[in-house]
Amino acid sequence: MGALRIILTILFIIDCLALTVIVLLQEGKSAGLGTISGAADTYWGKNKGRSMEGALLKITRVLAVLFMVLALVLNLNVF
């Protein structure tokens, strides 16, 4: 069981590093003064799910869930 704990700990560290990098790659949510004039309703604003920002958001969600699951499993002290 010690080997499983080591493997899960290594996965947890890799997940932490990946989550940090992905969060730092994302842009800020503030749109600035463009929201006043309605400039946020552009093609990129409407298709955000298909853009790089949308992909980063999905990856962030997956890594965050994996982070929480691994943290809970490692804290069960079953190993």
Image (tube, rainbow, N blue to C red):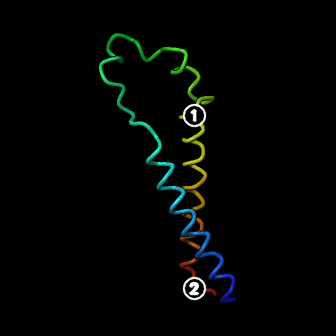
In the displayed structure, does residue 3 sit left or right of residue 74?
right
Residue 60 rendering spot, x and y as whole percentages: 54, 48
- Residue at (51, 63) in percent of width and height: 16
Label drawn at residue 52 = 1
- Residue at (43, 48) in percent of width and height: 24
Tell me the quarter of the image containing the N terminus.
bottom right
Residue 31 rendering spot, x and y as whole percentages: 36, 25
Residue 7 position by quadrant:
bottom right
Q: Residues within 10 Å of mark 1 (few under 14, many from 20)?
A: few
Q: Is residue 26 above or below residue 66?
A: above
Secondary structure of the residue carrying numbered label 2: loop
- Residue at (59, 43) in percent of width and height: 58
Label drawn at residue 77 = 2
Q: Is residue 63 above or below residue 2?
A: above
Residue contact at pointers 2 and 1, CB within 8 angstroms? no
State which tag comes first along the sequence, 2 or 1. Answer: 1
Q: Is residue 43 above or below residue 74?
A: above
Residue 39 position by quadrant:
top left
In the displayed structure, does residue 48 sit left or right of residue 40?
right
- Residue at (56, 62) in percent of width and height: 15
Residue 4 rendering spot, x and y as whole percentages: 68, 82
Amino acid under label 2? Answer: Asn
Amino acid under label 1? Answer: Met
Q: Is residue 6 above or below residue 60?
A: below
